[in-house]
Image (cartoon, rainbow, N blue to C red):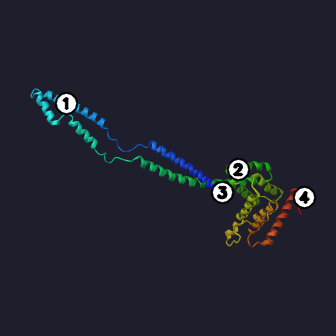
Amino acid sequence: THQELEFQRLVGIMALRKLISLVAIAAVANAFTPSLAPTLPRPQAAVSRLSLAQSRGLRRLAMDASSQSEARPAILVGREVAVSRGPPGSEAAQEQQYYEEQPAPMGELQMQKSGVNTMVLVGGGVAALAGGYFGVKNYKRRQQSLVEEFGYSQVMYWGEPEGGKENVKEYLGRVGPVINMFHRADMFKEYSKKLSSSKPLSATSLADFREMQTMLGVGKGSINKMIAKAAEELVPYTKPTELWERNANKPSVLGKLLWLTERCYPDPATIAKLRSRFPESYGDEVIDVLQKTLTEQAYKDVLAAAGGPEE
């Protein structure tokens, strides 16, 4: 159906938008997520720090040697330093090897970028699926609400063709400039139910009901289909057994819709469907009497509005 095609197209568009959002999120995460693994000092920086420490130590040893020069010669001091520290350059090499071979400090958080990106993608995917589901659900609820609201508002312009045209134009824009083509038939269905339930049968009702097809731009096939669907909604239970089922049926409103359809859209198949929606207790004779009564009442209303006799 048109609604199913529209729903599938909207789901595809929203899924494409969510996919683009996920790609953008992954790109941003890859660009701005820093690696949390600790960085070790570079060998060159370690050597420079060790050289500085060694020079400072030699200066302290020289100062100690100068303070002890009165008791021992400088040659003995230098020999003791060489013996305690080993050959020149060995201490720096040992300390450099020590720092380079140390493992990463324990207890610090180590997480690679791939793990962060995976969490971002999974979270974004879940959010996209949830947002798409609830977004489509809310969209369908909004469209259905607008269609039902149109039926109530359009009958307010009963007998006012220009006001009715403006109202139709407004609601077509609110439903959507392109999407409204999938809702025009439903708008006609809601209008037909509200017109039958709230307005008297008269020449004005006939004119408005006939003109609505042109205002909405709906074909005769869709008109007949929506009238039959409206009859099913007015009398959902043809064999009511419970009290709530009887209260849900509106056979009097269905009778008025049948009266309008016979005069504005006289399709034999559609009229037969409408007559079949009456409760079984009515029967063909009861339906014929009901239609005759509605015709006589409409004729009396026309005479009364023109100032003529009531009988």
Q: Is the Cβ of the residue at disc 4 closer than 8 Å to that at disc 1?
A: no
The image shows residue 153 at horizontal and vertical percentages of 73, 53
Q: Is the Cβ of the residue at disc 2 closer than 8 Å to that at disc 4?
A: no
Measured Cα–Cα span from mark 3 to mark 1: 90 Å
- Callout 1 amino acid: Arg
Q: Which of 57 and 197 is in front in this view?
A: 57
Which comes before the other along the chain, label 3 or label 1? Answer: 3
Q: Which mark is residue 170?
A: none
- Callout 3 amino acid: Gln
Q: Which mark is residue 3?
A: 3
Q: Is residue 46 above or below residue 275?
A: above
Q: Mark 2 points at which residue?
A: 172
The quarter of the rendered structure image containing the N terminus is: bottom right
Q: Is residue 84 above or below residue 138?
A: above
Label 1: state its secondary structure: helix
The image shows residue 294 at horizontal and vertical percentages of 82, 64
Most distant residue in the right direction? 309
Label 4: state its secondary structure: loop
Q: Mark 1 points at which residue?
A: 60
Q: In this view, does 244 lie above or below 111?
A: below
